[in-house]
Every structure is written in structure tokens, then in C-alpha cells.
Amino acid sequence: QGEILDMGGGMGAYAQALVERGCHVTLAEKNPDCLREVRKLGIPVVDMNTTPWSDLKGKFETVLLIEVLEHVENYRDFLKNVVDCATNKILLTVPCNDEFQKLFDAGFTYNHIAVTDHLNHFTSKNISSLFKELGCRFKIHKGSHLFPHALLALLYREMWGSFKGKLALSSLKVFHSR
């Protein structure tokens, strides 16, 4: 198993769980408080405020992008840079908004719609279009918000399972490859 980059990994929950399973993980983050806390865990960090994308290009077998893309202003360029960092797989998760109109018509909405730091809202259709624009092979799997920790088991299985290529996942789960 190769090096893993946990892009936008926050306080390092996924990175730490993977390290405990014997994985080699580096966490990339902009938030200085998160960087400081992850350093205390002994996990290598990359400060995205000061590190150019070119320093990360092709350095990681797998890149995790778990619930990050919805927070990124220029998500197309950001994702292209993430794709360039990975030599094999990407695991991407984003909140899925496929059924938004049905819920809205019934007087409901997703709880993540009200979150003010979500700059983007994705459907399986626009995630699919995004990966096609980037020239990536991918597959999408819709997951559940009810069991978020099941993601770690799926992540581990997919990273070392039979699927070869880049992996992007979401509550839409997108499996992606060059």
C-alpha cells in the first residue's frame, strides 16, 4: 500500500484511523489549529496555505477528499489539482442533493443545505459531469448519511480491494480513475 494524502482532513479523524491500521498518511489542511492538533498526533502534515500544488503532484498513491469539495470556492481547479496529486486512486465524498426537489416539494430539505460554509451543492449528475470534464474514469455510489462511520470500512475495502484506478466517493460515492 502506498502513501495516502488526506486533503482537507481537519482534525485528522480519518487519517488517525488509517494510521492505526498501518497506513502511511499525510494530512493536508489550511486551518492552522487543525494542523497544530494533527502534528500532536504524530501524523505528517502539509500546510496548504504555504505549499504549492506542484510539490504534491504525483506524490501519493491515494488521495482522500472526504466532505471537502462543497467547501471549496473554485472546486473545478481544486479537484484538477487533487487528481494530479494521486497516482492511483481518489476517494471523494460530498453531500448528495439528488432528491432535493422532491424533498422541497414535500416541505423538507437536507440538513446540509442550511450549513453556511457549504459553497457548493452537488448531485450525481453534476459530479459525473465534473469527472468527465477532467477526463477521469469513475463510478458513483450513493451512500447513507445515517451511518457515516461505515465510510471508513468502505474506504479501506475500496483502497485495497479489486477496483483499480482513482476512487472518488460521495454520499454520492464516486469511484474514479484516469
Image (spheres, helix red, strand yellow):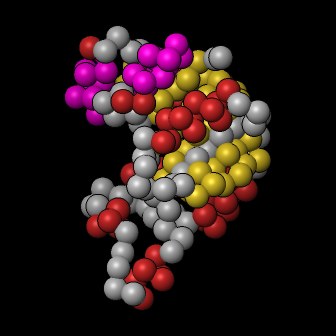
Q: Position of residue 98 (x, y in %)?
A: 54, 71
Above or below, 122 against 161 in this view is: below
Q: Quadrant of the C terminus?
A: top right
In the displayed structure, does residue 110 sit left or right of residue 57?
Answer: left
Is residue 45 rendered to the left or right of residue 131?
Answer: left
- The x, y position of residue 143, in whole percent, is 54, 55
Residue 132 vertical position relative to residue 6 in the rendered view, above or below = below
Count of numbered tags: 0
Residue 125 in the image, given as x and y percentages of width and height: 63, 67
Residue at point 45%, 64% (across, down): 121
Is residue 82 visible in the rendered structure shown here? Answer: no
Asked which quadrant contains residue 104, the reply is bottom left
Percent position of residue 174, x then y:
63, 50
Residue visible at 63% across and 54% down in the picture: 141
Q: Quadrant of residue 165?
A: top right
Left or right: 130 as drawn, with respect to 136: left
Compared across the picture, whether 109 is left or right of 22 comes to left
Residue under the image location 49 percent in, 35 percent down: 152
Compared to residue 101, the image places residue 115 above or below, namely above
Instruction: Please tell me which residue lies in front, 79 or 99.
Output: 99
**Magenta-highlighted residues:** 15-39
- Give the residue furthest to the left: 33
Q: Is residue 10 visible?
A: yes
Q: Quadrant of the N terminus?
A: top right
Task: Residue 30: name its quadrant.
Answer: top left
| Residue 1 lies within the magenta run | no
Q: Which residue does the image show at 39% across and 22% down from the upper left?
A: 16
22 is within the stretch colored magenta: yes
In front: 48, or 166?
Answer: 166
Foreground: 111 or 134? 111
